[in-house]
Image: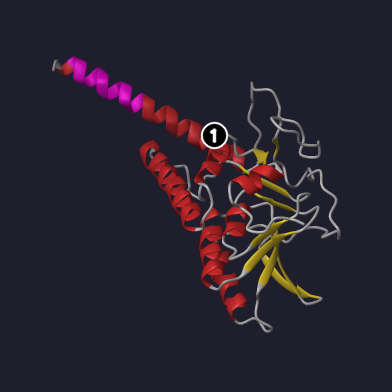
Amino acid sequence: MNPRAVARTMMAVLIFQLGIGALLVLGDIQGNGLPLPSFAPDAPRLSQPVRPGDQRRQFRPQEDNPQVQPVRDPGQLPDRLTLTFEDGTYRLEGMIAPGDAPRLIAQIDRSDPPVNELILQSPGGSVRDALDLGRHLRAASIATRILSGEYCYSACPYLFSGGAKRFASPSASIGVHQHDFDKNTYLPAFIAIEDIQRGQGDVMAYLHDMGINPLIMRHALATPADEIYILLPEQVEEYGLTTETPS
């Protein structure tokens, strides 16, 4: 090939990689709270009711609350996933932070009385910790539950999927979206993309192992990280997220 043609090809590839890298960096900046201009129409606020075909909502957990009415007001959820025991019930609530899986696994294993079921409520967080913790719940035959009016978003449905038995009230709010898998996107574009693809593959393998229909990922992959796709009760059942049908 002509040396000039080779040079032009290499330059085109470099520009392409830089362009993807810039988009990934911008996405990381936006994910850290710095707003970026958007030319797409805004999704409705999370507080607005969800209807079939109209299920994407803005995802700003510090500003909006879902359109649900919890039986008990949890107040401000913890910044890190927290295990509590009250009135004979274990609850696991708060943001899923990196490193939460080994910390919570140790707490669950030494809990007295033993943990048989966990009530979950979380806006999400670290996907990898959710997967590790979910696998431990399944191995320990611990059930998971989402109560009426409470919510489980982002990485939380993967944690919920780990339950040996799983129950979600029809009025619970369960939502999925895209993830960055806690990777620093200030990396060469091809490395960042490879990490994201590997992470998506890990999630799909996990869902298969847990008996969840991996087609649920089509909603996650199509929903930007600053939005959330709220699953309808019939979708929760269709994808196998629950093992018990509400009476």
- Mark 1: secondary structure: helix
Say which of 50 and 169 sits in front.
169
Looking at the image, residue 217 lies above or below residue 23: below
Task: State the residue lying farthest toward the bottom.
Answer: 112
Please name the residue shown 55% across and 62% down the image.
Answer: 134
Say which of 199 and 99 sits in front.
199
- Dominant secondary structure of the magenta stretch? helix
Looking at the image, residue 232 lies above or below residue 15: below
Q: Residues within 10 Å of mark 1 (few under 14, many from 20)?
A: some
| Tally of numbered discs | 1
Please name the residue shown 69% across and 30% down the image.
Answer: 53
Q: Which residue was labeled with disc 1?
A: 26
Say which of 191 and 69 sits in front.
69
Q: Is residue 156 left or right of residue 73?
A: left
Any magenta on residue 55? no
Say which of 227 and 90 sits in front.
90
Any magenta on residue 14? yes
Which region shows up in magenta?
A: 4-15
Res. 99 in view: no
**Tag 1: amino acid:** Leu
